Image (cartoon, grey):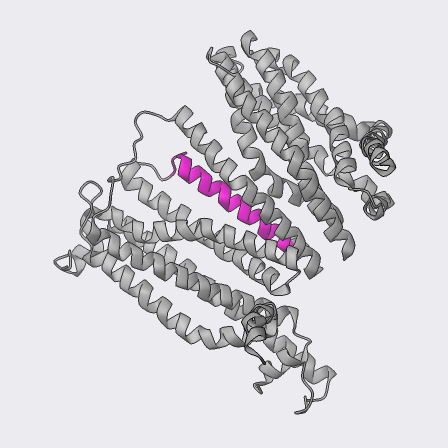
């Protein structure tokens, strides 16, 4: 194996479910440990050590779950769509597996963001649900995820299901900016004067640090769970191949 | 940096906001744990089925030949 | 040179041939064709019954009701765009043809709009009167619905293509498509409401036009990619 070939070898290997299954198996313990460490540190730091917000008091601590989940809800859709596009263009099976795995994770992240947002809304706005621009956009994002999940489940032929949901995810990516802009515009049109978001212009550094740890922790968590879902999907798709049987037998 | 609460009950009530914070934490952690457990469950189930199929249909794998 | 001339003649032919074919099919299945319009009228009748017959209250929400009902009526019919062709195999033939299939697909979507969107738009003034929509809002409502229903057909065609091979797409299709319909409902009702409030209603209408142009460019591509993915399996 020469060096010049070696430079591109990883790209071809990346497309192979077998290679991914083996390499991710080696990553899993490290990813799990890092996820646990970051999430526990961020959570304890944010819940117990960060100073309370001047206006919102302790209820602001929900931010340490709400913001990272919102980040990944949106980023997850783009990860799903990019993986789907890679699958459609280069016909890489692994890309489709990543796309399929990203859908349920993104949907759950969106659900967490919506739920924590609603809980946070009660002490802040006085109501669990407010038709605020960001809340509404998040809800529509959840619907987009549900559409992709429903389409994935509907097809018995794996390959067609992959392609169909990849196309739907791509159509969604084109539409997400339109949806966000239109909902924003709609909200400014109907904005009731009594509702004002009481967020400080910039966060204090003592509050920001645990938030950054939590965002990092959520990203590592995302990678970990993406690997777990992808591995389950690989075993499901390739259960009749020799190499999967070998792995299940325990012989490498 | 120092802990913001004087004792455990203060930490749990969070001056009235505790119920909101803890519900949010509980829900989020439940969801995150479910996200970890679900693919592990699917993996284990599929592996078990595949092992049963294998013993039914084919002879145990030899050492030679790989795909 | 000759190829170019031939191609430029053939492309509109594909458009009109498929549009005409679908219009003939629509006339043959007249019951299915008329159902969305009847649904539109009946569902709009539910609103005064469920809410209140008060003209003042109805006029405030008339724009939203008309837009939502048009959306639902379109959803009822949109799975039909490719279903009949899929069942009798002519969709498969379209995919084998060497020419670009975006143009025939656009023709089919145009036919769907002529059969569904346009009649609903023409019915809307009648329901506007019944829901006491202010007179100033009629022109913006008709224009926004005419453009908007074409957008509904285009997006709906993508959903119809994605679910055509499932056979039971009727349940899945709304789940896929409704999130994509949300912006157009916002701008559609905003056009009508702006006219009611005496504001400049051409601005949201222009956005609807822009979204329609974007959808006309992209949706046929998405549909053809989907149909090819389905037929390769």
Residue at the outermost front position: C1
- Could you tell me which quadrant the C terminus of chain A lies in? bottom right
Nearest to the observer: residue C217 or residue A176: C217
Number of marks in picture? 0
Any part of residue B53 in sight: yes
Please, is residue A42 above or below residue A129 in the view? below
Left or right placement of residue A226 versus residue C144 in this view: left
Q: Is residue A165 left or right of residue B39?
A: right
Residue at image point 65% right, 72% down: A238
x then y, percent, for residue A151: 63, 51
Q: Main secondary structure of the magenta part?
A: helix
Q: Quadrant of residue A20?
A: bottom right
x and y percent of residue A233 in the render? 59, 66
Give the image location of residue A31, x and y in percent: 41, 70
Residue beneath the point at 30% across and 59% down: A213
Read off the magenta span: A129-153
Q: Nearer the viewer, residue C76 or C82?
A: C82
Q: Quadrant of the N terminus of chain A?
A: bottom right
Q: Is residue C167 visible?
A: no
Question: Residue C101 location in percent, x, y?
Answer: 78, 41
**A100, B43: nearer the viewer:** A100
Whether A19 is among the magenta residues is no
Considering only vertical position in the picture, is B41 above or below A187?
Answer: below
Residue farthest to the top? C135
């Amino acid at each position: 194996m020469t060096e010049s070939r070696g430079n591109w070898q990883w790209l071809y290997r990346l497309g192979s479910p077998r290679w991914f299954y083996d390499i991710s198996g080696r990553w899993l313990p490290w990813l799990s440990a890092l996820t646990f460490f970051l999430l526990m540190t961020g959570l304890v730091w944010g819940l117990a050590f960060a100073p309370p917000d001047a206006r919102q008091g302790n209820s602001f601590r929900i931010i340490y779950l709400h913001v990272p989940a919102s980040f990944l809800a949106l980023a997850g859709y783009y990860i799903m769509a990019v993986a789907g596009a890679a699958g459609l263009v280069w016909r890489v099976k692994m890309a489709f597996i990543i796309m399929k795995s990203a859908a349920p994770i993104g949907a759950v992240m969106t659900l967490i963001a919506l739920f924590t947002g609603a809980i946070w809304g009660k002490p802040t706005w006085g109501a669990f649900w407010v038709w605020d621009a960001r809340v509404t956009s998040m809800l529509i994002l959840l619907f987009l995820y549900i559409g992709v999940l429903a389409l994935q489940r509907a097809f018995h032929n794996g390959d067609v299901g992959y392609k169909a949901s990849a196309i739907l995810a791509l159509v969604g990516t084109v539409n997400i900016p339109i949806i966000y802009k239109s909902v924003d515009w709609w909200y400014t049109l109907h904005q009731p004067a009594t509702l004002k978001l009481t967020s400080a212009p910039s966060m204090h550094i003592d509050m920001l640090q645990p938030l950054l740890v939590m965002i990092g922790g959520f990203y590592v968590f995302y990678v970990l769970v993406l690997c777990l879902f992808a591995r389950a999907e690989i075993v499901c798709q390739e259960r009749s191949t020799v190499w999967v049987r070998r792995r299940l037998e325990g012989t490498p | 940096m120092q802990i913001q609460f004087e004792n455990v009950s203060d930490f749990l009530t969070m001056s009235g906001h505790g119920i909101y914070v803890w519900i949010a934490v509980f829900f989020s952690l439940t969801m995150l744990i479910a996200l970890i457990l679900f693919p592990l469950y699917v993996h284990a189930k599929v592996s078990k089925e595949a092992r049963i199929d294998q013993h039914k249909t084919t002879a145990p794998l030899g050492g030679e030949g790989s795909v | 040179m000759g190829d170019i001339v031939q191609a430029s003649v053939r492309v509109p032919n594909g458009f009109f041939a498929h549009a005409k074919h679908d219009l003939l099919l629509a006339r043959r299945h007249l019951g299915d064709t008329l159902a969305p319009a009847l649904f539109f009228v009946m569902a709009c009748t539910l609103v005064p019954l469920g809410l209140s017959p008060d003209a003042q209250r109805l006029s405030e929400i008339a724009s939203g009701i008309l837009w939502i009902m048009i959306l639902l009526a379109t959803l009822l019919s949109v799975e039909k765009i490719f279903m009949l062709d899929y069942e009798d195999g002519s969709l498969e033939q379209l995919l084998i043809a060497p020419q670009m299939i975006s143009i025939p697909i656009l023709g089919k979507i145009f036919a769907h709009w002529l059969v569904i969107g346009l009649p609903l738009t023409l019915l809307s003034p009648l329901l506007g009167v019944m829901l006491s929509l202010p007179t100033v809002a009629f022109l913006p409502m008709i224009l926004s619905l005419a453009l908007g229903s074409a957008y509904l057909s285009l997006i709906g065609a993508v959903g119809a293509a994605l679910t055509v091979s499932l056979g039971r797409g009727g349940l899945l299709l709304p789940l896929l498509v409704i999130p994509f319909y949300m912006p157009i409902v916002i701008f559609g009702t905003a056009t009508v409401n702006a006219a009611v409030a005496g504001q400049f209603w051409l601005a949201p209408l222009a956005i609807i036009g822009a979204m329609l142009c974007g959808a006309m460019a992209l949706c046929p591509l998405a549909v053809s990619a989907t149909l090819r993915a389905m037929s390769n399996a």
